[in-house]
Image: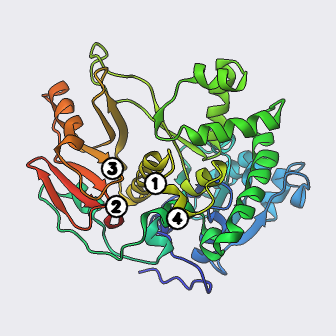
Amino acid sequence: MIYIKVMEGYKRRLIEKRVTELFAYYPVIAVLGARQVGKSTLVENLFTGKVTTTVFDPVVDIGNARQDPDFFIQNTRTPAFLDEIQYAPELLGSIKRKVDREKQNGQYILSGSQNLSVLKDISESLAGRVAIINLWPMTRNELFEEAGIGFLQAWLSTHDKPALIIQKSLPTYTSIWHGGYPKIAELPDHLVPGYWQSYMQTYIERDVRKVANIGSLQTFSRFIGLLAALTAQEINHNQLGRELGIARNTALAWTEIAESTFQWLSVPAFSRNPVKKLSGKNKGFFTDTGLICYLQRISSPEVIAGHPMQGRLFETFVVMEIIKLIQQLPIQPNLYHFRSHTGAEIDLILELNGILYPIEIKSKSNPSRKDIRGFSAFRDCFPKENIHQGLVICATPSLQPISEDALAVPWWCL
């Protein structure tokens, strides 16, 4: 049993156990995630007093790490936490040589906020020596410090109908408007827009400049705002480019930058047979609804109820909650969406152990059979697949059967 003494005000993360276990079995672990999601705070609380911490900088060459990486590694006591490693990628080769020489686990913890550049360097330099952990913004359970196994985990781990685990409800639009960034939870509502303004300025000027040579950062900033408006939809990069007066290839490259910096997530369409008349486009999700609300100038939680994006904000929020929660599983399910050319669709499909788990997300309290037509269409398209009972995640006050093959579940019980 590992006992962790945490800092005052620190909110525990669901992924803590996985981080400590992996560090015991790998010489290097890499904690990757967007700026300010709590990577450094997580590591510092898990390993207080046990690691030597160095935070790298895009301008200053801390400890001469970029100029003489071997010397830096030789003079850094292990276990070591190397924060913002994307600013000193030269160290990765030196780390590889040291861990190969010493053959000990638990030597280095790396963190970074640029998935594309960091992962490329790590995969080339530390293949087989590093465990990678993605840290997303906080879940509702983490923000409100509620423990226990939620409905989703029970649903994925049993063929029987799991019992509903009652948890404290929270107004839906409040959770959506605040999102999951740790700092937001500490701020009064009137200071939240200022936080996001500073965040976007730092993100554009530091992270984006590092990942790619973009001619117009102002146009890229507009692109991020447009991408936020398109959350929970299939993405057409031709249309996206036309809106901004940029080429399709540029729109595609910029979407990949947003994904590499953890602001965007793509979910592929499900298909076993390319001959089927199914949509093959990826569906995209902005990774935090709080940032979407800022970019769309939604000034308060109450505004969301009548906003044109209300349904897509709710879907994005629930999808991201699911993605964060399944990271606790030993094997994470594959993620898909489904849409036929006739318009039948399923918002999210999880694939685990050969079983497909269809999930529909509705921002309503009383879903009906009309809301589960996609489940029937999916079963008709794939009659040989092992398809589990479907879930409709919504604002229902309690678990409700909709049909023999579908359950309505409150979103706050995930």
| Whole-percent x, y for residue 122 in the image | 64, 44
Q: Residues within 10 Å of mark 3 (few under 14, many from 20)?
A: many
Mark 1 lies on a secondary structure that is helix
In this view, the residue in front, 116 or 247, is 247
Give residue 362's mark: 3
In whole angstroms, how far apart are the C-alphas of marks 3 and 2?
A: 10 Å
Residue 90's place in the image compared with 151, above or below, is above
The tag earlier along the polypeptide, 3 or 4, is 4
* Side of 350 where 259 appears, left or right: right
| Whole-percent x, y for residue 3 in the image | 48, 84
Q: Amino acid at mark 1?
A: Phe
Q: Residues within 10 Å of mark 2 (few under 14, many from 20)?
A: many
In whole angstroms, how far apart are the C-alphas of marks 3 and 4?
A: 22 Å
Q: Quadrant of the C terminus?
A: bottom left
Residue annotated with mark 1? 317
Q: Quadrant of the N terminus?
A: bottom left
Disc 1 vs disc 2: Cβ atoms closer than 8 Å?
A: yes
Q: Amino acid at mark 2?
A: Trp
Can residue 403 be seen in the rendering of this structure? yes
Q: Residue at x 66, y 20 (%)?
A: 242
Residue annotated with mark 4? 138
Residue annotated with mark 2? 411
Give the farthest residue toward the top. 275
Q: Amino acid at mark 4?
A: Met
Mark 4 lies on a secondary structure that is loop
* Side of 351 where 233 appears, left or right: right
| Whole-percent x, y for residue 289 in the image | 54, 54
Q: Amino acid at mark 3?
A: Lys
The tag earlier along the polypeptide, 3 or 2, is 3
